[in-house]
Amino acid sequence: MRKLWAEFKAIAIGGTVLDLALGFIIGSAFATLVQSFVTNLFLQAVASVVGEPDFQQLTVTVHRTPIKYGQFLNDLLQFLLLAVALFVIIKFMTWIGVERGRSLDTRQCPFCYDRVPTAALLCRSCGQQLVEDLPTLAQAEFLQDEREARRWPTLPALPPIAIPRRRHPAPGPPPRQDEAP
């Protein structure tokens, strides 16, 4: 029973499950944010142009049977605006450099035929060496630091701004006229 409990703890509290849970929570919060952005901004902009933000009441009658196409138009418009909003957000995140350091190019490991990043030195599946000479630990750390510096560029430091200081204390309030000396 203890072994089973230890295995459960290793899976449930392990880093991968926590990463997945945090990603799910952040993803659902992000989905709510994007949904609000589409509903409260884009649909209102469409309403200002078209004159009506909700097309749910639109119907067509065919042989005395109402066909309610308005809800479909609402859903279609919301989907299109959501897709545009996500596209804009992804383009903005790419522009500010969130994905700048990540390479999506892969190659095939000649030993196990798994797909690995082109910059990989070892195969993550079989552990085989993919380059002739592996770098030393110092060289690998230097290359990693160099990649990180390119990935997250630092802003230049601003020159210090001189703030003038008062040499004399500020004068107190003027004496009141109604007080007798």
Image: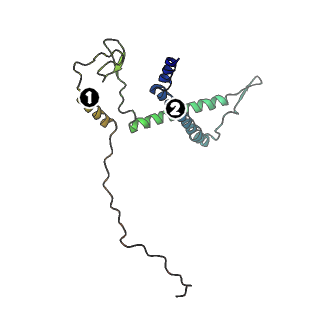
Viewer-side residue, 113 vs 165: 165
Q: What numbered label is drawn on residue 140?
A: 1
- In which image quadrant can residue 15 be found? top left
Location of residue 114 in the rendering, given as x and y in whole percent from the top left corner: 36, 15
Q: Decide if residue 51 is on the left or right side of residue 4.
A: right
Q: What sort of colour scheme is used for the picture? A: rainbow
Determine crowd level at label 2: few under 14, some 14-19, many 20+ residues with C-alpha closer than 10 A: few
Q: What numbered label is drawn on residue 79?
A: none
- Above/below status of 157 relative to 79: below
Q: Decide if residue 97 is on the left or right side of residue 18.
A: left
Determine crowd level at label 1: few under 14, some 14-19, many 20+ residues with C-alpha closer than 10 A: few
Viewer-side residue, 20 vs 96: 20
- Going by the numbered disc 2, the residue's amino acid type is Gly
Q: Given this view, does label 2 or label 1 mark the residue nearer the observer? A: 1
Q: Decide if residue 136 is on the left or right side of residue 106.
A: left
Name the residue: 53% across, 32% down: 25
- Above/below status of 164 relative to 37: below
Name the residue: 66% across, 30% down: 71
Residue for badge 2: 27
- In which image quadrant can residue 126 be found? top left
Q: CA distance from mark 2 to mark 1?
A: 34 Å
Name the residue: 33% across, 18% down: 123
Q: Are marks 2 and 1 in contact (CB under 8 Å)?
A: no
Regarding mark 2 in the picture, which secondary structure is present there?
helix
- Going by the numbered disc 1, the residue's amino acid type is Ala
Please, which residue is most extreme toward the front here?
A: 2
Location of residue 86 in the rendering, given as x and y in whole percent from the top left corner: 50, 33
- Above/below status of 41 relative to 143: below
Viewer-side residue, 125 vs 81: 125
